[in-house]
Amino acid sequence: NVIHEVTLMESALELCRQGHCGGYFPVFIVQLHNRRLKPMYNLVRHVVPKQDEACFTEAYVVKRKDTEEHRDFKLICKMLRKGTKS
């Protein structure tokens, strides 16, 4: 169920920090977040109950044509591909 819809990851992280919702974030994002904030604002992993069928959705990574692909951008793309059907 989608209750909040945001366009920036920081907005999603803030909603999670305030306890208003949960989110799906790559592990490295959560590790960076937790390393930089006070323990009271750390994100905690909750296991999602397994469903009978795997749930997949299309994801698009968008960048400007003239923007260089940096290491972090490539890492995010790799993590997204890792969780998608081949």
Image (tube, rainbow, N blue to C red):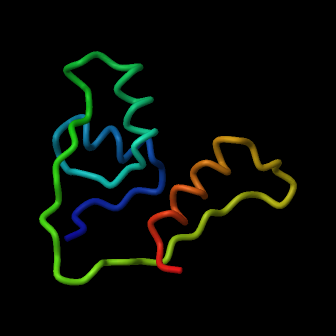
Position of 9 relative to 86 (above/below): above
Q: Residue furthest bottom?
A: 53
Asked where in the image residue 63 lies, by quadrant, the reply is: bottom right
Q: Quadrant of residue 14?
A: top left
Q: Position of residue 46 (x, y in %)?
A: 17, 48
- List x then y, in percent, for residue 68: 82, 48
Number of callouts in the render? 0
**Residue plotted at (47% across, 72% down):** 84
Q: Residue furthest top?
A: 38
Residue 13 location (% of width, % of height): 35, 41
Q: In the depicted view, which residue is nearer to us: 23 or 12?
A: 23
Q: Residue at x 37, y 37 (%)?
A: 30
The answer to which quarter of the image holds residue 61 is: bottom right
In the figure, is residue 10 to the left or right of 49? right
Q: Is residue 15 left or right of residue 47?
A: right
Name the residue furthest left: 49
Judge whether 10 appears above or below 65 on screen: above
Q: Nearer the viewer, residue 63 or 85?
A: 85
Residue drawn at x 48%, y 49% as measured from the top left: 8
Q: Residue at x 38, y 50 (%)?
A: 25
Q: As rendered, which of 60 and 20 lies closer to the eye?
A: 60
Q: Furthest residue to the right?
A: 66
Image vertical order of residue 31 relative to residue 55, above or below: above
Quadrant the N terminus occupies: bottom left
